[in-house]
Amino acid sequence: MKPRFGTIVSLAAIFASLLLFVTLVTQGFAPLWRTSIGQHMLNRWLQFRAHVPEGAVMARNGEPLPKMELPDLQGARIPLPAAYLGKPLLINVWATWCGPCLHEMPMLESLASRGTTRVVGVAWDEADDVRAFVQRRPLGYPVLLAEPTKANATLLGDPSSVLPYTLLVDAGGRVVRQHVGPFQSADELAEWARID
């Protein structure tokens, strides 16, 4: 007797569900969040959970990055994304107290040193703490300061204020993609930051 198409589809669905369950039990959600589908789902969930008010100005994929001005470490106001147009721009939101953020810094410096993508860190922290940190551990890319407010987080597309949080903006100022959480390797970050 030949198996029915419906039976094959049901068995495939059961197998995929078991595989997903085993992966979640043994490795947690990390492998899922590293995929583009997982990142999309996580971004949607965090935006839903954060209850972003209708009509709020927020960075969204495919749309221009909302205009904002943030101070650099010397206090000069830098317009985003206007100050960095002409090349792809990676904006990494971090804090001095965030372990995964600090772990990512060498990867971000590696990407910045290639020269194909500009990297800007946006410190979600007290200005004095950031200045002291950067004095102890100089970074190979500029750092801007942002007050940790719901409005600033929403402007950057991260209304739940999850750190680290990364945005990729094209040379014209349009948001290409967003990433919640840390990157695991310089290669993963470089691949994610490519704009074809």
Image (cartoon, grey):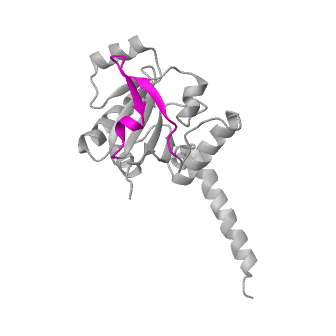
Residue 140 horizontal/vertical position (percent):
26, 31
Quadrant, the C terminus: bottom left
- The magenta region covers 64-87
Q: Is residue 23 left or right of residue 110?
A: right
Residue at the spot 41% in from the left edge and 14% down from the top edge: 127
Q: Is residue 78 magenta?
A: yes
Q: Is residue 96 left or right of residue 186?
A: right
Q: Which of the 4 image quadrants contains residue 157?
A: top right
Task: Please tell me which residue lies in front, 162 or 29.
Answer: 162
Quadrant, the N terminus: bottom right
Residue 5 horizontal/vertical position (percent):
72, 80
Residue at the spot 61% in from the left edge and 54% down from the top edge: 20
Q: Is residue 151 above or below residue 184?
A: above
Residue 171 horizontal/vertical position (percent):
38, 48
Q: Is residue 57 above or below residue 174?
A: above
Q: Is residue 92 left or right of residue 10?
A: left
